[in-house]
Amino acid sequence: MFSYELACNLNSRVAAITSVAGGAFIGAFYNCNITHPTALLNIVGTNDDTHPYNDSNGWYYPVSEINSYWASVNNTNPIPLVIELPDINISDGSQVEKYSWINGDGCVSVEEIKIINGGHDWPSPLSPWANQDINANTEIWNFVSKYNLNGLINCDNLYLEFENSENKRELLKIINVLGRKVNATRQKREVLFYIYKDGSVDKKVIP
């Protein structure tokens, strides 16, 4: 809860936040002053009794609304990528899914690590009662260390790499997912296919 408070009210100093088994009271985001892309990682359990995943009392935002708010303010793709993480320890009674809203401003993403059947716990292989498939410490550092106040570190360089790779091949045309030719090379957050004279094709999503 304090992480959300800092991200909202001290945003000029916060590049990215994570929340483990955390909640946000209804109204917590009413006065947010987001001044730059701010990445979020949520690590949450679906059976959390302290900060319910879907609060029926109306005290806390459902996790889906927290993710939706931060995806919206960061201008990410509206539909997340979903992957199922390996169930390393089948005896812990829980499994993990990862949801990623990508291609936000500054290349930031909003992510949820969803612990199915997880409680109000800190996931760790060393925990005798929490999910043991992931290590929350590692997940947090791997996430927040990628960002600075401008967004993803080296975001601009990633785009330049695309530009440089194009210059080595002769581009024939650019089409969208419907097969229609497009003229602009920077259709924001649209999947585009770059077709080259040598027969190669690149799929790109320009942040």
Image (spheres, grey):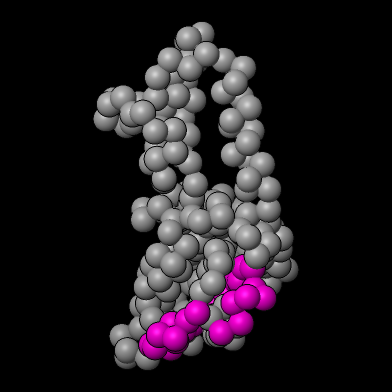
The residue at 47%/62% (across/down) is 74
The residue at 54%/72% (across/down) is 35
The residue at 62%/68% (across/down) is 16
Q: Main secondary structure of the magenta part?
A: loop
Q: Which residues are magenta?
A: 9-33
Magenta residue check for 25: yes
Residue 17 location (% of width, % of height)? 61, 71
The one of 76 and 105 positioned closer to us in this rendering: 105
Say above or below: 99 vs 130: above
Whether residue 191 can be seen here: yes
Residue 29 location (% of width, % of height)? 43, 82
Magenta residue check for 129: no
Quarter location, residue 138: bottom right
The one of 194 and 35 positioned closer to us in this rendering: 35
Residue at the extreme front of the image, as rendered: 183
Side of 192 where 107 appears, left or right: right
Side of 136 where 59 appears, left or right: left
The one of 82 and 168 positioned closer to us in this rendering: 168
Quarter location, residue 59: bottom left
Whether residue 89 can be seen here: no
The residue at 52%/13% (across/down) is 170
Residue 11 location (% of width, % of height)? 59, 77
